[in-house]
Image (tube, rainbow, N blue to C red):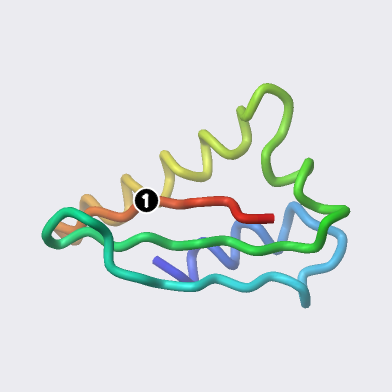
Amino acid sequence: MKDLLIYIVSHLVDDPDAIEVIERDGEAENETVLELHVAKEDVGKVIGRQGRIAKEIRTIIRGAANREGRRVSVEIAG
């Protein structure tokens, strides 16, 4: 899931070298949290107007994780 998130975000931002994803365990069992860090200038591009792009990124990641029987959530830390 981490690679998929990096792939998606790298096509949205101006500085793909600044992308960092930290993978950690979630509060629930079998849950993983992907914490996304991007350059300050690119945070708006990842979130989008009214959070639409962020919502779609989360939907794609959740769907891909669901196929593997996992629960994954994405947090955008900026």
Q: Nearer the viewer, residue 59 or 43?
A: 43
Residue visible at 58% across and 51% down? Answer: 76
Residue 71: percent from the left, percent from the top?
23, 53
- In the rendered image, residue 24, in percent from the top left (x then y), is placed at 36, 71
Mark 1, secondary structure of its residue? strand
Q: Can you name the residue that lies furthest to the top here?
A: 50
Using the image, determine if residue 78 lies above or below residue 22.
above
The local crowd at label 1, few if under 14, some if 14 to 19, many if 20 or more residues have their Cα within 10 Å, is some
Quadrant housing the C terminus? bottom right
The quadrant of the picture occupied by the N terminus is bottom left
Q: Residue at x 55, y 71 (%)?
A: 21
Please name the residue shown 69% across and 46% down the image.
Answer: 46
**Amino acid under label 1?**
Ser
Where residue 28 sits in the image (x, y, percent)? 16, 54
Q: Give the labeled residue for mark 1.
A: 73
The answer to whether 25 is drawn above or below residue 31 in the figure is: below
- Residue 72: percent from left, percent from top: 31, 55
Q: Residue at x 65, y 57 (%)?
A: 9
Left or right side of 48 for 28: left
User: Which residue is the extreme one toward the front?
Assistant: 27
Residue 46 vertical position relative to residue 48 in the rendered view, above or below: below
